[in-house]
Amino acid sequence: MKRLYYLTDTIDSTESISKDLHLLGITDWNLHVLSKDDDGLFRHHIHGANTLQRLDLIHSGEQGALIGVVIGLCIGVALMLGKPFGIALDLIAIGAIVALFTLFGTWVGGLSGLSHESYKIKRFHDDLDAGKYLIMVDFRKAREPDVVQLMENQHPEAQFAGKDTTWINPFKFAHEKVSH
């Protein structure tokens, strides 16, 4: 799925955008708003971003898993070739070593991600600190013209802030800010 980012200055504008996107057929499942004002979002019945969208849990967990796989393979191959205990390890033992390191890497990466904001929203950190509202709209590619047209025609106060996918790429780090 694709994702468009928009920034607004007020909760009223955010609420109006949310209502119009719902009328367009964008459900709460595909509409998320990130703000310092979580209470305001709740009072205005605006779907806020969840923990997985706010924090880097999945992204860091994926990176940890990849590092764990590499370390597990290196240790497994070294143990298989070196036979340090005088016993030849079979593929099941090597697979268990790789799985153990992969799980450990995922766990450590996930814990690390709990203390960092998502790499996808890091570029909006200063705007969010300034009190702006980040609207994230997810949609299938065929719906993009409808969403863009709605935002341009009915909500010129919303600043286009970027375009991305919803896929979390473990090989990417913080994005650069995109202008319209």
Image: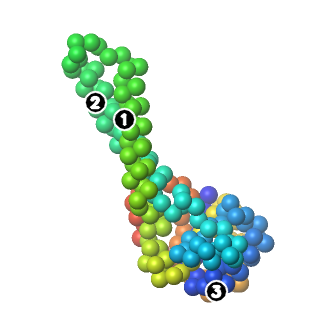
Q: Residue at x 36, y 24 (%)?
A: 94
Residue occupying the point 63% across, 63% down: 138
In front: 171, or 19?
19
Q: Secondary structure at mark 2?
A: helix
Q: Amino acid at mark 1?
A: Phe
What residue is rendered at 63% in x and 82% in y? 11
Quadrant position of residue 137: bottom right
Is residue 170 left or right of 87 when viewed as pictured? right
Q: Nearer the viewer, residue 108 or 5?
A: 108
Query: In the rendered image, which quarter is residue 10 located in?
Result: bottom right
88 up-or-down from 9: above or below? above
Identify the mark at residue 101; answer none if there is no mark. 1
How many numbered dots are placed on residues in this image? 3
Please, what is the three-letter code of the amino acid marked with disc 2? Ile
| Mark closer to the observer (3, 1) | 1
Density class for disc 2 (Cα within 10 Å; few <14, some 14-19, many ≥20) is: some
Q: How far apart are labels 3 and 1 at the CA level?
A: 50 Å
Which residue has dot 2 on it? 75
C-alpha separation, residue under disc 1 versus residue under disc 2: 9 Å
Residue 101 relative to residue 27: left or right = left
Label 1 packing within 10 angstroms: few (<14), some (14-19), many (20+): many
* Relative vertical location of residue 117 with respect to residue 170 in this rendering, above or below: below
Residue drawn 21% across the image and 19% down it:
84
Query: Going from the N terminus, do you reach mark 3 or mark 2 first?
Result: 2
Q: Considering only order in the chain, which callout, 2 or 1, is on the residue closer to the N terminus? A: 2
Q: Is label 1 in contact with label 2 (beta carbons under 8 Å)?
A: yes
Q: Position of residue 33 (x, y in %)?
A: 60, 71
Q: Secondary structure at mark 3?
A: loop
x, y (%) of residue 156? 64, 86
Residue assigned mark 3: 156
Which mark is in front, 3 or 2?
2
Task: State which mark lies toward you, 1 or 2.
Answer: 1
